[in-house]
Structure formats: C-alpha cells, structure tokens
Image: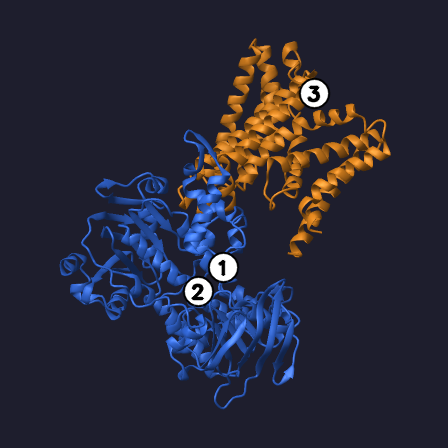
Chain colours: A blue, B orange
Amino acid sequence: MTGGSEGHQPFLVLDGITRHFGATRALDGADFGVAPGEVHALVGENGAGKSTLIKLLSGLYQPGAGRILIDGEPAVISGPPAAEALGFRFIHQELNLVPHFDAVGNAWIGRRHPRRGPFLDRPAMRAHVAAVAARIAPDLPLDRPAVRLTPGQRQMAEIVRALMTEARLVVMDEPTSSLSETEAERLHTVVRQLAASGTAVLFISHRLDEVMALADGYTVLRGGRTVGAGRIREIDRAGLVRLMSGGSASTGSAAKTDRPLSAGATVLAADIAFGPAGARARLDIAAGEIVGLYGLVGAGRSALLKALWGAVPAHGIMRLAGRPLAGGPAGRIAEGVIYVPEDRRREGFAGALSIADNLALAHLSDFRRAPRLPMPARRKIDAFARQVGARLRLVAASLDRSPLTLSGGNQQKLLFGRWLGRPVRLALIDEPTRGVDVGAKAEIHDEIRRLADAGAGVIAATSDIEELMALSDRVLVMNGGCIVADLAGALLTRDAVVAAAFGHASADLSQPQNQAAAVA
Amino acid sequence: MTLLRRYGTLLALALIIAVFAVASPGAFGSMANLVNITQQMSLLAIVAIGATLVMVVGEFDLSVSAVVSFAGIAAVSLFGAGFSIASVFALVLVTALAMGTVSGLLVARFAVPSFIATLAFGTIIGGLTFWISDGATLFSGIPPAFRDLGRGALFGLPVPTLWLIGTAAIVWLLLDATEFGRRLYAIGGNREAARLVGLPVRRDMVIAFALSAGLAALAGLLLAARLGSAHPTGGGGYLLSAYAAVFLGMTAFREGEPSVPGTLVGAAIIAVVSNGLTILGVPSFLQDLMTGAIILAAVLVRQFGRAGD
C-alpha cells in the first residue's frame, strides 16, 4: 500500500512502475504516493532506485510499465517543462546555482523576467524574490553571488527559486548532507512550513534520525521495489533499517565495538596556525586512537586536515613521531600519513583515468617494472587494484572503467583503497561516509577501525553526529578555527559535543589543557 | 554503431585514403606518394605532438607557431655568426625549453589562464623574431650538412619522416608507459585530486609546456633545414593545424583524451586530404573547407555516440 496523509488522499501515485536499463532493473515494481501537505521520506540504500524514481517524476525518464496518477488521472510527464507545469520542483544534491548570479538572478533563470522596455527591471525582480524569501528565509542575503553564500544559504536560494511559482511537490535529494547542524535545523523548519502551507515535500536522506524527526510518511525502496511504506510514527529506526537492508546489514552506525583504549605513543603533535585568520589548533594524537573531529560548517575541520596534510599553508610545529613534517602531501605520504578528502569528485580522483590507475596514483613508484625505471607495470597496477577490490568488496563492472561509473559508496572505498598495503602511521579522513549507503558505511567504518587497530592514529572529521559517536574514541570539537573542546570517556556525550560546537560549552570544557588533564 | 563510435576517426582516415586511391590510382595511390605524405605531415605532427603534451594537462599552448618561426630565424642567424650545427641545435632547443618554462610558470605558478599567457608570450616571441631578422627572410650561411637534416632519405625513408617516428615513439612512451605520463593524465583529469595525492602538479605542468616549446623548436629547425631559409612568420600555419590534429586525435582513441597515436591519425588525415586534393587539382580554399568539415564531422559523430550511451 502507498502511504497517504491523514485526512488527505495522495494526489500523486506511482503504481507498479518499472524502468530497465539494458539488463539492469533500476525500478522493478515501485509503488509510491504522497498527499498534499505531507513530508514524505524516500529511503533506501544506494542503487535502490531512488534517483531513478525522481528522474521519472522530473520527466527525464519514462516508465517502462506501470502508471503515474495525478489527482486520480493517469498522467504522462513528458519532460522537465511538463514537471514544472505540474508544480513539481527539484532540489538536487549538487546544487544548480549560477555561481556569479545572486539569489535574485538565480531565482529568475528560465522564467520571463520583468522588464521595463527592453531592459530588465531589477527592482521588480528583487521585490518578487524578496517576497518569496520573506516567508522562508528572511535573512538570506539576496544580492550576494552564490559563490559567496554558505552551503545552507545556497540551499535556501534553491528553495526560493523552487517556490517562485506555485509548487505542489518539492523534491529534495539529500538536502542536509552538506549542512551544519544549525543549517539543517533551519531547513527542517522550512520543510515543515512548506508542508503546513499544503505543499508536499519528498525528501531523500541517509540520516535516519532526520527521517524520524521530520517525515510524516515513508517509502522504502530495495532493489527497485517498494518494500515498505506507511506512517513514520508507526515504525522505528531499527524497523526502517531492516526494511532497507532486507534484514541483513548492520545499522551502519552500530554499537561501537569496545576497543581497548591503550595509551599509545604520540604519533602526531601539532600546534599550528592555518587557513582562516585566527585559526589555531593544538593537538596530540596517539597511536591506535580514533579521534573524531566535529564542528559546524565553517568551523575549520577541513582546513585543519588540509593543513596537516600540507595542502594549505600552515605555520607552527607539526611532528610525526617526533620528526617534523614537511614537503607537502608527497612528504606526508613518504612518512606514512594518508588523507581521504571531503569531496570525492572534486578532490578525490580523476574521472578520465581508470579505477585501477586512480588507485595507483598516490604511489606510482611502487609499481615500477624495475626499481630504478620510472615506468609503471600495468600488471602490477592491475594486481593491486584486484587485491584492493577484493579486500574492500568494491562493486565495479570493471576496474578499467572510470570511477565515475561507481556508486558513491564504492567511490569512497576507492579513496581508502589507494592507501591499502602501506604502513600507515596517521590517517586524516574528511567525511568518511558522506552520501554513502548503510552497507558501505559499515564497511568503511570497519576499515577505519582496522587502521587504528594496526596502530595508526586516526583523525576523522564528520558532520554526522551519529557517525561521530559511533566511531570516535575521543572527540575534538572546533569552533571558529580553534579546538574548543576535547572530550573522551564519560565526558563524551552527544550533548557535550553539540554544546561545544555551538559555543555553549562550560568553561572547564572549553580549555583543551584542562580537558587533556581530565582525560588522563 | 559501437565500432563506428570507437574507431570512427580511424575508419574515416581509411575511407579518405580509399576514395583518393580510387579517384587517382596512379598518382595518389603510388607507394612513392604515400611515403611522401608521411614527409609532408612530419613537421605538423611534431608540433602537434608537443601541443598534445600540454593538452593532456588540460591547457593550451598558443605560442607553438611563434616558437617554430623563432627557431628557424635564430638558427640561421647563429649560422651567420659562425656557430656549428651541434651548437646551433643545442642553443635553439635550450632557448625554446626556457621559453616553454616561462609559459609553464605563468600558468602553473602564477595561475594565468594558459590561453592568455601563451597568446601574450607567443606575441612577444614573434616580436623578438622580427627584431632578430629585421623582418627579412634569412638564407645565407646555412651549411649543407644542416640542410641534409631536413631533406633526403635514409634507409629508404624521408629524413623528416624519421624525425617524426623518433619523436612520436619517445613522446608516446613518455605519456603511456612512464610515471610522468600517468601524472600528466591525472593532472588533466583532476588537478586538485592530483595535488592532494602528492603529485608535483606545478613542476609537471611546467615540464609539459617546456617540452611543447622544445618540439615546436625542433620542427622550426627542420623547416629551416628543408627550405634552406627561414622566414619570421614561417611557422604561422602550424598553430591551427596542430590543434586540429590534436582535436581529431581526441576523437580517435581512448575516451576523448589527447594521445600520441590519436594526434598522428589527426595529422595524417589533414595531410592526406591536402595531398589528395592537390593531386586532383582542387583549389586550396576548397581544401581548407574540407579539412574543417572533416573535423566537425568527427566531433559530431562522437557527440552522437555519447548521447547514445
């Protein structure tokens, strides 16, 4: 059965939809329904068919079989203009703003601009956008180019654009994956507001806490099929996970294995000024510990990791097992430091190279035909790639293909895989599992724990607090470019982490020196 | 269809050769003429192979034709001043490598868009060339032994063809079989990712620009040797043809990546069309028209192939 909101019948129903791509069944009997004013969550692991379903709604794909009903009438969504005319709006995971346009300019793209004679009537354009923004994002700077907006503000600019004309359905694909906790809260408020005004909101999220807190109804897809749908208040988190995984996979952020917290030797001692003005961090990382790095967006987590990696300038002391770190990323690699970047497409790999070549890229000299001959042997690279693929259970049609053909979870595994087989002393990991499905998430977490068990110090920055709590032995919280709290043991609670990130930490938590004493 | 998409450009080359061979079996299809085509394409292909190196890292070097002209003028001037062949080669090539290094530094170190940097620097080189030559064609003082480096035959093959074979083999090996080559493709694919995995991005880019200028200078030296003279704009025609060859080559193999075999196919198409049409007595404006149409057709076939994926 498809889920309807209490008091409302679904206005949009998908009934037994199939969509095949060659032999791949992206959708194979998907049912779905959403009512006016309902917040509906579409959940499922990567590859479950969520994206395909959304592309059907936006008219990019046509169903192979099954029906789309709108207000009870069979409908054909012939293309994006048809979807637009139906009042369907889409906010994609990768935002689609013109970087140098401000919110006003972006909101009017593709619409009939108000004009005075042959010229654009900027005051009228702005007034209209301001009226829309006043309802949902009154503090959005309308005249600032999109490049200079924060991720949260960009999201708001997208939503403003979506609501320029009457919207019946707003579809959001992972809307909070790059937002800080406050920004996500803000977005949740807007979503509830939209629903209260009668607009249906369909959102895709891997954050189950968010789904539980925000949605009225849910639909779970698995293998292109609807395996569950209903009211959120009639199911719990574990129930959703069971439906998504088919009852096999763990919850991803499963109970933390109680790893013995041996007081290993210090691998990293750093006291550096870096990146944004006034950013300064002092930290000590011991061998075998997983240190979670938390903070709101803009708190400086990524900048700190990049500074430690030598990819952005930093001043001060960085010592790895007592020896100063130098020589940029290449120098770090030589010393057994590894790095997994935040944005895998932009910073992680070269799409024009094969999966195998990407895996070999960071240490090409390991694959030489002869020790002094800087010519890589195809055979050795392929053998390494196969070994990594087997070890990380990489799901790839072929290792000769581009990494762009991989799912998000497998792309992420690739970034870990390139460092396999090398002794690791320090791992710098930025957002280990963003946009990764539950199964791959658990595997990546296991991989991180293996690194620590093998004696590496691990710093893992994440904006997913469930992940932070599941993974970390100790948590450093950043705010305004500085480490403001160092939490472990009994002091490491969700509340303490969030409080510190928001700058509400009590005095004794905000002093790293005191905290180090408390941990010891 | 897949076959057409993957090897369309190669098939086009084969088809063009077949058409000319049927239209003019005696003149075009003769072994002597086919060998002659390899000679006609050799200088263009050497310049294009240099441009390929820079294209692999995702940049343009628009100064190649200026360097070709400069190398010829510089060489003949140096002969006039009494330098030996070996020292002329060394001086000209080292100067060109230095020029390429400057372009590379402008792009890699100072983040000037390569289009602008190499256009401006190419213009400077052009001015320098005019200054040295006083705007005149130079031909006095060229030793006959130098002229033999650009003409005649060895082992039954024209000497320029041998230069091309050597150059193509070395650069192909460099791009395809060495760590340096892997790094260049990675830099072209995703510069930030390459930087973050510790590749020496700036240094490698500078080397690519330097080699591009070096190969353009080699072509300039061979051109002067073949003609027995040097003109301050003698290399002017090479820029567009070289990039046409690279772009055609990018449609020939591998997923749209520049490569040495691709560039060779591209240069061959341009040379075959030019040679065939000349033999058939077609006026040269029609040759340009056809060459342009062939490039567009190759790229369009590719785009349609993409859409079908």
Q: Is residue A269 left or right of residue A11?
A: left
For the residues labelled 3 and 2, the Cα–Cα distance comes to 61 Å
Residue at coordinates 71% horizontally, 45% vertically from top-left? B8
Q: The disc numbered 2 marks a residue on which chain?
A: A
Q: Classify mark 3: residues with Cα within 10 Å, few (<14), some (14-19) or many (20+).
A: some
In whole angstroms, how far apart are the C-alphas of marks 3 and 1? 52 Å
Q: Residues within 10 Å of mark 1 (few under 14, many from 20)?
A: some
Is circle 1 on the same chain as circle 2?
yes
Q: Position of residue B40 (x, y in %)?
A: 71, 26
Task: Please give the residue where the numbered disc 2 appears in the rendered image.
Answer: A437
Under mark 3, the amino acid is Leu
Residue A62 occupies which quadrant of the picture? bottom right
Q: Residue furthest bottom?
A: A7
Q: Amino acid at mark 1?
A: Ser
Q: Quadrant of the C terminus of chain B?
A: bottom right
On the image, numbered disc 1 is attached to which residue? A407
* Residue wearing tag 3: B157
Does label 1 lie on the same chain as label 3? no
> Do the residues bearing badges 1 and 2 touch, measured as CB atoms within 8 Å?
yes
Identity of the amino acid at label 2?
Answer: Asp
Residue A424's x, y, as percent?
31, 46
Res A279 seen here:
no
SS at badge 1: loop
